[in-house]
Image (cartoon, helix red, strand yellow):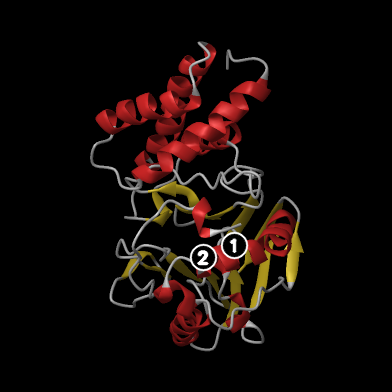
């Protein structure tokens, strides 16, 4: 996998900042990404006895910032770490938490890290000097605790529900729900006011599924949540879930309409991009429309029944 697989872009230093710490519920804060590229929204969720950190930032130095904040926030409580998926800005700082926190993720995400992690490390290191420096010294880390489908973590008076979603943005996506606060962490299954990120890089990586992603978002939107913390972008409400569901449905429908008529893929990309930019002119990440179209063209050709 090479940087040729990623949309071209000039990237600033993806540094995790403590300038925008948002309290979204009692004993629950988010280190907001400030709309900086390759910086995730990072959660710190507290209970009486323990604190759970959600995502690390990209590389050891960012993770040191997160760990120092979480340690001070925990004030003696036990630390746990989880990551929403294996991509570098979300999980490539896990090594920093070794010995300080118990790291737990689902089995599919652990497999992603083992099988896909080295390729993504090389690919992201090729994005420019600022990103490469953040990735210096990264050691891909396997978890202390692995679960299969779901895991309820008791922080003491607060249960946090970790759920493996199955294949969508990646094979090992995970949502983190805090029921008593009505808060849902989605990772990159949801971005705020941004076109969905499709890591469709054949032949290196074709694990993303637009159809399964749409099905998942339809379920999440029906379940709702008071507060949604997306992988990137502004914290919001249940409308963020509906926005992604509606976008993925539109992307599928516009792509498949043209694929049904045997239109060339390049023309489909051009026409669908024009439609989507008209519908979502203020959304960021338009470079991810083309990979999404290519993914759904593939799924069209292999899905069989197109009536769903």
Circle 2 residue: 124
Residue in the image at 44% along x and 37% along y: 290
Inspect this view and state whether residue 80 appears.
yes
The residue depicted at 62 percent of the width and 86 percent of the height is 100
Q: Which quarter of the figure has residue 42?
A: bottom left
Task: For the residues labelled 1 and 2, say whether their Cβ atoms are less than 8 Å apart.
Answer: yes
How dense is the environment of label 2, judged by Cα within 10 Å: few (below 14), some, or many (20 and up)? many
Front residue of 180/92: it is: 92
Q: How many numbered marks are there?
A: 2
User: Residue at 65% across / 52% down in the picture?
Assistant: 172
Q: Quadrant of residue 16?
A: bottom left
Q: Position of residue 115 (x, y in %)?
A: 73, 59
* Foreground pick, 216 / 94: 94
Q: Which mark is residue 120?
A: 1
The answer to whether 6 appears left or right of 79 in the picture is left
Residue 223 position in % (x across, y down): 50, 37
| Mark 2, secondary structure of its residue | helix
Q: Is residue 27 above or below residue 211?
A: below
Disc 1 to disc 2, how far (Cα)? 6 Å
For this view, does 121 lie left or right of residue 109? left
- In the figure, 114 relative to 134: above or below? above
Q: Is residue 157 visible?
A: no
Q: Residues within 10 Å of mark 1 (few under 14, many from 20)?
A: many
> Residue 82: horizontal and vertical position, in percent?
60, 67
> Looking at this view, is 196 or 134 the one in front?
134
Horizontal and vertical percent for residue 61?
48, 83
Q: Please, is residue 58 above or below residue 7 in the view?
A: below
């Amino acid at each position: 996998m090479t940087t040729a697989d990623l949309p071209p872009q000039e990237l600033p230093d993806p540094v995790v900042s403590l300038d925008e710490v948002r309290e979204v519920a009692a004993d629950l804060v988010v280190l907001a990404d400030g709309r900086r590229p390759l910086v995730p929204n990072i959660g710190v969720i507290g209970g009486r006895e323990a604190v759970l950190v959600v995502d690390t930032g990209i590389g050891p130095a960012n993770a040191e910032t997160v760990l120092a904040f979480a340690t001070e926030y925990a004030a003696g409580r036990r630390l746990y770490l989880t990551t929403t998926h294996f991509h570098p800005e979300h999980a490539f700082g896990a090594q920093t938490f070794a010995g300080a926190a118990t790291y737990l993720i689902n089995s599919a995400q652990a497999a992603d890290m083992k099988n896909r992690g080295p390729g993504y490390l090389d690919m992201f290191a090729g994005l420019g000097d600022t990103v490469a420096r953040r990735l210096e010294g990264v050691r891909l880390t396997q978890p202390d605790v692995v679960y299969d489908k779901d895991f309820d973590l008791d922080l003491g008076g607060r249960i946090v529900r970790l759920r493996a979603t199955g294949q969508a943005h990646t094979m090992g996506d995970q949502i983190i729900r805090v029921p008593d606060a009505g808060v849902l962490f989605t990772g990159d299954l949801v971005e705020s006011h941004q076109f969905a990120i499709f890591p469709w890089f054949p032949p290196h990586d074709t694990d993303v599924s637009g159809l399964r992603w749409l099905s998942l978002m339809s379920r999440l939107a029906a379940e709702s949540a008071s507060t949604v913390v997306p992988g990137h972008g502004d914290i919001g409400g249940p409308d963020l879930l509906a926005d992604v569901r509606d976008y993925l449905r539109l992307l599928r429908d516009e792509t498949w309409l043209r694929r049904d008529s045997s239109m060339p893929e390049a023309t489909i990309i051009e026409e669908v991009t024009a439609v989507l930019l008209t519908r979502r002119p203020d959304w960021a990440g338009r470079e991810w429309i083309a990979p999404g179209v290519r993914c759904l063209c593939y799924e069209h050709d292999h899905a069989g029944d197109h009536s769903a």
